[in-house]
Amino acid sequence: MSTAARSVLYVRLPVWKIYPGGVIYVADYVHKQRPHVDQHLLDLALVSPAERKRVLRERIEAMRPDVVAFSWRNMQSFGPHPEDDALDVVMNFDHARNPLRRLQAAKDALRIIWNYSASRLNNFAYMRLARRLLPDARIVVGGTAVSIFGQYVVEKCPEDTVVVVGEGEDAMLSIVDGFEQPVGDLWYKDRDGRVTQHKRAENFDLARLTAVDFAYVESIFPDFHQYLDDQYIGVNTKRGCPFQCHFCLYNKIEGAHQRYRDPAEIGQEIETLNKRYGVRKIWFTDAQFCSTRRSTEHVDRVLDQLLARRTDISWSGYLRLNFLTPEIARKMLDTGLASIDLSFTGTQEIIDNLTLGYKLDQQMAAFRMFKDAGMTDQKVKLYMPLNAPGESVQTLQRTIAKIKELYELFGRENVLPFIFFIGIQPRTPVERLLISQGYLKPDYDPLTLNPFIIKKLLYNPRPLGTVIGRAYLEAVETMDAGSEYIGRATMDILERELRKPEVLKACRTDRIPIYPAPRAGETTR
């Protein structure tokens, strides 16, 4: 197909129920640039599994679109989410003392892997169905999963498929216009099965992303209202990340240069959601809502828009607090900040090892700014990369001590330590490190269904991994339902265990620094 498209069917592939913000931004942008194009959005997450193929077939046959664009959110089988107990399963399989629990965990792990395998196969089957029904249409695949694994996905796609990596607005517009002048980061499988790659020449001008026309979204996506029942609605304010955290791909997918939407357009978008549709919960979907000095100034202008429009919302997003000021902290609280969500480790060694790009002292000072600004019952959510490369008994003990400082500052009940481990992603520094150390083979498959490799990709090596895992399992077993938060209970037990001489002896190691020092002329940031 080389002529301009007259119609596009967007298909959101099955996932847990979460607002499809990315595909909505793309469809809204294409409509504003090419209003004559007929667009519709089918969300298979809202269709029962037994009905999905039938519903997709009927929609394709009724519409006969020129382009079928699939949005694929998650792909890796080790990634825990609200409908997946993968973390509990791995903990039990690796660290449970009861052999029966380990056996049950092995069965549960096979179930999870089977479900993910079936999901992947089904998603490719949906694409093949579209190709059979529409032999002359162009197929497009994008979304978070594809942005990470595009080169693996394209090999399994039907012929004449465009795989979009990263942001898709301008890429989709070039496809709608006939794909004679491709735009964006793309993989393309042509009609002869040959795969080529097209690299983005320049970043999308995010200032062109105006407030979403939700009346139009309703017209192409009637199921939009199913996401207004107390769900968080995603709003994007910027893209790009200048940091190079060793486990993250945001700076590769969105670029290292931060680009910003017009604060007035963001304010209008949120005001419409709030006052027309009754939306009360907003999640800012940026890599980080505030991080650099300039992005914090942009946040300040966004908050001014919310204050001027008197929106009645509760909001959050991933935060960096490097350049927080008392005035911005106050504005955050006044506009409805629900929680402080951020990466946290209580030791500068781990921050530096992972090149997270901030100072612990700055972060702790920012916490005190929030308290001084009047923070009361808002939650502090600490996403802690426990047992990251370089972790030791001493660094864990210092992290626990910092968490206890936050208990004193905000109240124990308001501080939520989230137990998570680094997920190893392809083409990241942590992957290269672990390959060089022999932890992973150079030719390993990041989309493998081998349970032993999957387990290694959720990085929590012994000996500390055993101590952390058993502390977590003890917390699950012993705490009264509803009486304590699992993360707090785990950290309490971990503090106790790290005092035991036998644990200290088992974990005695010299693992810091873990990353080789940069050569002359190189930089890690």
Image (cartoon, rainbow, N blue to C red):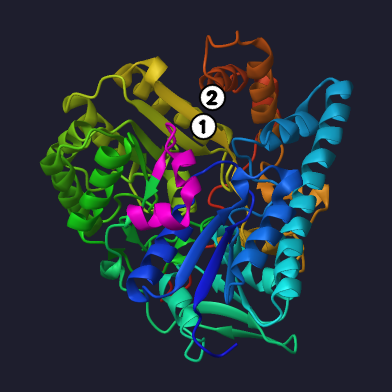
Residue kind at label 1, given as amino acid type: Phe
Q: Quadrant of the C terminus?
A: bottom left
Foreground pick, 303 / 224? 224
218 within the magenta span: yes
> Is residue 190 visible from the viewing direction of this image?
yes
Foreground pick, 483 / 420? 483
Residue 367 position in % (x across, y down): 28, 32
Against 147, is 465 above or below? above
459 within the magenta span: no
* In this rendering, position of residue 159 left or right of residue 401: right
**Magenta span of residues:** 214-233
Specify the quadrant of the image occupied by residue 60: bottom right
* In this rendering, position of residue 312 left or right of residue 34: left
Against 154, is 276 above or below? above
Residue at label 1? 418
What secondary structure is marked by label 2?
helix
Which residue is drawn at the image coordinates 67% and 66% (left, top)?
61
